[in-house]
Amino acid sequence: MELLTELLANLFDSVIGAYFVLKLNKGNVRENKLFVPVIALCFAVSTAFLFISVFSLLHTAVITAILLAYAFSIKTHTVLSSIISVVVYEVTLALSSALVFFAIGNVLKIDVSLIASGFSIPRCLLLFLCKVIIAAVLLAVIRFYSPGRRFKPIDFVLYLVSPLMAIFTVSLFFVLSLNENLEGYYGLLFALSLGMVGVNALSLLLFARHNKSEDEKHEMQIVLQLREAELRRHTDSQKIYESVRILRHDLKEQIMFAKKLFEKGEFAAAEDHIARVENMVNDNSAVVNTGNGIIDSILYSKTSMNPDIRFIVSGSVCDLNSIGDIELVSLFMNMLDNAIEATSASNEKIIELSFSYIGGFQNISCKNPIIRSALSENPELNTTKSDKTLHGYGIKSMKKAVESANGLIEFYEEDNYFICHVAIPV
């Protein structure tokens, strides 16, 4: 039974180690072909060291080397994330046991040597307590370290409070198992501790699935926005083609008319007519070229649909590899929709959009006039529309899109203008 206990402990360490390294390097369990082999290799090495009387640091060094090599094999890894994942795992593994034994010996005043070896329910509970602490710490690190994920109050409850309750429960059962009067209830105590930890694990699993479902709904909303933008782009392209055909026909007629005026010697009238033709051409030049096809399409769509608003675009866009196309559409569609809505209510019909590259960041600034302060009345920028189920996702979608690229977004007001500033790493 003692050997079985050690084998189960080694298997747990191998599974949680491989999983932690994979997740912290943004890997996927189903897609990674080395996940199971790495677990098997770590388990085999740990089992072998059970029968070899060598310095424990050698065991740690071998497992560290295996996990580090595994981290570097993950396609989505970075050097920093690979090193951090292995170091955090090994430190957590070492400190959890040390802290538990320190607490037992110095706080509870229990002779640890009496339960540190051999097989007994108290020792099983002690090992179980160490593994619960390790799992709680590593899962919390995975959740809060991951870039692009926003902290929610419910995360604090599920990823911190819930594991702490499980740790407290197992600790309580461990203390009770040291009471000789309860020796006949050791099996029940162990079963109860397993049940409590199982309930906590199940709650975390259900919450994770719920979160995934919410994220999928959000992604579907963005996909629908992208589809809508593509449909508008197609429709607008047809309009452009038709407008160019009409403009070409009109220009031929206008040029012929201006030529006749010159032949008659009516130079002033001819110049005046050419000026009017030039204005007509400028009015039909709504195409914008920022250097990014997606942004250009959205801008053309918005300018065509809002002819009463003047769009001033300056600067150019560099390669935005850090943000996905879906997120980029979500960001600009919502940014311009908010600016257009505010500008429509103002007497000044101007929206200024500027692009610049500074210090490794693509800076994007959208500036629109406001008739009154929006931030003083609504600091969180929550929707003011009556139907909360259909509205209120604009600002949230923008923030999520920027955070997915590890960027920054801020909203502020200056001289009766509302400004949205975005910085995306390039």
Image (cartoon, grey):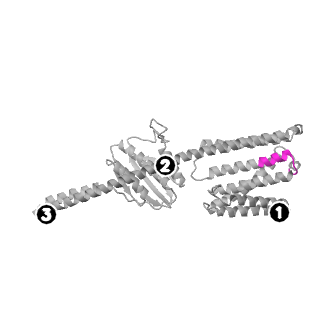
Judge by depth and name the residue closer to the eye, 167 or 186.
186
Residue 186 sits in quarter: top right
Q: Helix, strand or loop at disc 2?
A: helix
Can residue 67 be seen from the camera position used here? yes
Sequence-wise, the earlier of marks 2 and 1 is 1
Q: Amino acid at mark 2?
A: Ile
* Residue 249 vertical placement versus 194 (above, below): below
Question: Which-is-in-front pick, marks 1 and 3?
Answer: 3
Q: Amino acid at mark 1?
A: Phe
Crowding at mark 3 (Cα within 10 Å: few <14, some 14-19, many 20+): some
Q: Magenta segment, which residues?
A: 116-130
Identify the residue shown where x is 76% and y is 63%. Answer: 62
The percent position of residue 355, horizontal first and vertical second, equals 42, 57
Rounded to the nearest angstrom, the CA distance separating label 1 from label 3 is 102 Å
Figure disc tally:
3
Sequence-wise, the earlier of marks 1 and 3 is 1
Query: In the image as oriented, which residue stretches furthest toward the top?
Result: 386
Crowding at mark 1 (Cα within 10 Å: few <14, some 14-19, many 20+): few
